[in-house]
Image (cartoon, rainbow, N blue to C red):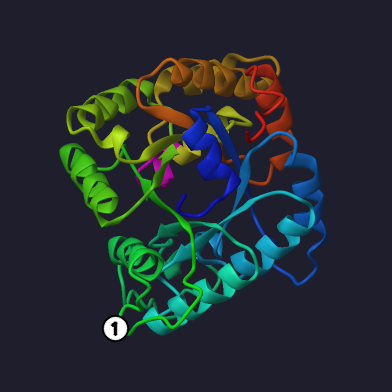
Amino acid sequence: MKSGSRLEKLFEQGEFVVSGEIGPPKHSNPAIIKEHAKMLKEYVDAANLTDNQTAIVRISSIASAVHVLGEELEPIIQMTVRDRNRIGIQSDLLGAASLGVKNVLCLSGDHQSFGNHPTSKNVHDLDSIQLVAALKQMRDDKQFVCGEEMKESEPQFLIGAVANPFGDPFEYRVMRLEKKINAGADFIQTQCIFDMERFERWMDMVRERGLHKKAKIVAGLMPLKSHKAARYMNKNVSGMIVPDSIIERMEKAEDPKAEGVQICVEQIQHLQKMEGIAGVHIMAVAWEEIIPTIVEKAGLYPRPKVS
């Protein structure tokens, strides 16, 4: 085992994993993190703790992970290259490992202009692929990025990365995925899927390259609350496609939230039949309380035990 995390063990058992996402608050009170962890721990196998998502200052993903661990839920910390140079990143990773974190998701991070400090400076000392490679070097070679040997207790992480099948140029997206897997990614979480036809074409290319056998592909999903939210994301969120058929279905629904849940459940059931999909990652932004309902309706409750 690379990390011994619950997530890794379930992957190895061949279970269809479920992860959720908890957004830390914009203040220092961790109560909402603990509340969401208590609510989700029986319904997901692990939970992402976002790292200053949308470039807005929040409780750090590492501190949030400690609060989640305290509620007996396994964390996946997100680590962006936007806010730290290689010294800060490696220091934070050592600190996270010392606190019991076993899963890390590597990503670039949203541009600072989207957040509440638009004049701040992005760092990008490493890019997201180099971050994956750095974690692998620390874990497998027991070396820092500079090549210096780590004297003892190397961090043992399951290494995650993200993929967006909906950005352009389309063919380039699978090449970028391959670079991340070759750099050492053990699992991949994708951008939110609404355009299933395009996702299936992307998965065809993933399977042609055998990438689904080298890393676990976890499909990202987001339950919709309204047709306005769907239309907004389709128009304004880079790299996200919401087909007109879904927007119209939400618009005609008598109970839009219930319809959003139903669409999400149907997507999960479709993805379960797709070769190469190892699980789903549910990103219910500011709607974490809906995740148990989705998991139950999709027939994914109770969650499997680690054997």
Query: Would residue 113 be counted in the magenta stretch?
Result: no
Q: Amino acid at mark 1?
A: Cys
Task: State the residue in front, 139 or 217.
Answer: 139
Residue identifier under label 1: 146
Question: Along the line of sight, which residue is nearer the eye, 251 or 214?
Answer: 214
The residue lying at 55 percent from left, 36 percent from top is 10
Secondary element at tag 1: loop
Indicate whether 199 appears above or below 38: above
Q: Position of residue 182 (x, y in %)?
A: 23, 51
Give the magenta-colored segment's residue range.
234-240
Does 46 sit above or below residue 63? above
Q: Is residue 146 above or below residue 107?
A: below
Q: Is residue 145 left or right of residue 34?
A: left
- 236 within the magenta span: yes
Residue depicted at 59% across the width and 31% down the height: 223
Front residue (pair 67, 165): 67
User: Is disc 1 surrounded by few (<14), some (14 to 19) or many (20+) residues within 10 Å?
Assistant: few
**Residue 77 visible in image:** yes
Q: Is residue 251 visible?
A: no
Which image quadrant: the C terminus?
Answer: top right
Identify the residue at image location x=28%, y=49%.
181
Kindly indicate the quadrant of the structure image that contains residue 303. top right
